[in-house]
Image (cartoon, grey):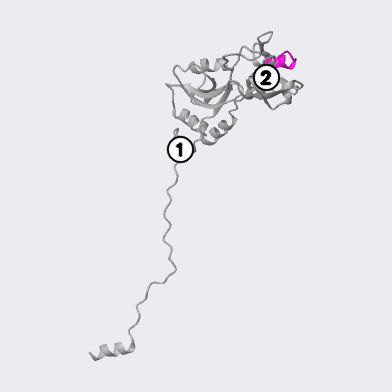
Amino acid sequence: MTDSEFRLAYVPGVTPGKWARVWAERVHDVPLRLLQMPAAEVVPVLRNGGVDAAFVRLPVDREALHVIPLYLETTVVVVPKDHAVAAVEEVELADLADEDVFEPLDEVLAWDDRPGQPAFTRPENTAGAIELVASKAGVLLLPQSLARLHHRKDLTYRTVTDAPQSQIGLAWLEAVTTDLMEELIGIVRGRTPNSSRGRNPPQQPTRKKPPQQPTGKKPPQQRPASKHRRQKRRRR
């Protein structure tokens, strides 16, 4: 971390804007700098000190890293809008058995057995695979966030109910858990400012107890002695 900013990397598909807004509200003196990077580059840059923390796609090599798993992503299949799959709400892997399925070199899903048939080529990246799907040369399975990122008007996607899922996590170096890092962890986990483990949380002002208000009842008054009793006292 530099003295002037906190550098947060994120892989394509992650949308860190909501966390950045909360950071701006809570940490006024250190701006958050967001850096999008290819998934394969994020961890090396983190290890080299190029960023202070990163949203990564799991699994990653966790040596010397702290990693907090955050959420799972829905897996979808991207197809041309006139493809038969577009007529249904969701599919299973078995429904893609006869499809040519692209496997880009930056594939983020872990497969035991890949579905369908291998396509005629392995595109260099997801963007290239999307272009080939648009040419009707095959289909592509990927996290829904990436399908949204590479949205095209001539393509659509459907949920694949039994496909492996990608998971997003927050990673940082074990040796560098600073107060600002704790602040980010608290923001990502949804902690309130008062429950944050980061920098000194704002202290709630001590409330003084209001003065006790009268109850409205008059204190009991001593009744004056009767005339007969006053005369008795005088005779004594």
* Residue depicted at x 30% and y 87%: 229
85 and 51: which is toward the camera = 85
Residue placed farthest to the left in the image?
236
Question: Which residue in the protein does label 2 denote?
Answer: 95
Name the element at disc 2. Answer: helix
Residue denoted by label 1: 195
Residue 55, quarter of picture: top right
**Residue drawn at the location 52% of the way across and 21% of the way down:** 51
Q: Is residue 128 magenta?
A: yes
Residue 33 location (% of width, % of height): 56, 26
> Per the image, is 53 magenta?
no
Q: Considering only order in the chain, which callout, 1 or 2, is on the residue closer to the N terminus?
A: 2
Q: Where are the magenta residues, as a range?
A: 127-138
Indicate the amino acid at tag 1. Ser
Q: CA distance from mark 2 to mark 1?
A: 48 Å
Query: Dominant secondary structure of the magenta stretch?
Result: helix
